[in-house]
Image: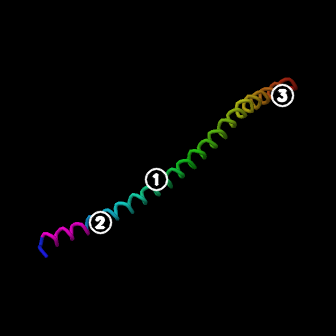
């Protein structure tokens, strides 16, 4: 056997090894990206729910604050009227 054939065999073994490693790495990267996608989807749903809660709280806090202020002024008016 000539040295050139030995070199070709060694290089082809390393090439096959690196090809196999790159395929495994690609599969792992695809799995990681799918997990990241599911985490971001979950975070987006959570943010949407929190946004809806804040929006509904805004709807009720405005009138409640207004009614509280009106009741406070009515109590002050009643106290002045009684004295």
Side (left or right) of 41 relative to 8: right
Residue under label 3, please give it.
Answer: 79
Residue under label 2, please give it.
Answer: 16
- For residue 56, what is the image quadrant? top right
Please check the rendered image and state whether residue 40 is part of the magenta-colored stretch, yes or no: no
Main SS, magenta region, reads helix
Query: Residue 62's mark?
Result: none
Q: Position of residue 53 (x, y in %)?
A: 67, 40
Q: CA distance from mark 1 to mark 2?
A: 26 Å
User: In the rendered view, would you say 4 is above or below 31?
Assistant: below
Depth check, front residue: 68 or 22: 22
Give the total number of marks visible in the rendering: 3
Kindly state the secondary structure of the residue where label 1 is placed: helix
User: In the rendered view, would you say 65 is above or below 50?
Assistant: above
Query: Residue 33's mark?
Result: 1
Depth check, front residue: 59 or 75: 59
Q: Residue at x 24, y 66 (%)?
A: 12
Magenta region: which residues? 4-13
Crowding near the residue tagged with mark 3, few <14, some 14–19, many ≥20 C-alpha atoms within 10 Å: few
- For residue 64, what is the image quadrant? top right
- Pick whichever of labels 3 and 2 is earlier in the sequence: 2
Q: Are marks 3 and 2 in contact (CB under 8 Å)?
A: no
- Pick whichever of labels 3 and 1 is earlier in the sequence: 1
């Amino acid at each position: 056997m000539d040295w050139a054939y030995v070199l070709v065999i060694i290089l082809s073994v390393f090439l096959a090894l690196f090809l196999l490693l790159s395929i495994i790495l690609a599969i792992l990267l695809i799995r990681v990206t799918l997990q990241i996608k599911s985490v971001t989807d979950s975070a987006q749903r959570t943010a949407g729910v929190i946004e809806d809660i804040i929006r509904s709280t805004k709807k009720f806090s405005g009138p409640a604050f207004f009614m509280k202020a009106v009741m406070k002024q009515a109590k002050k008016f009643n106290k002045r009227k009684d004295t």
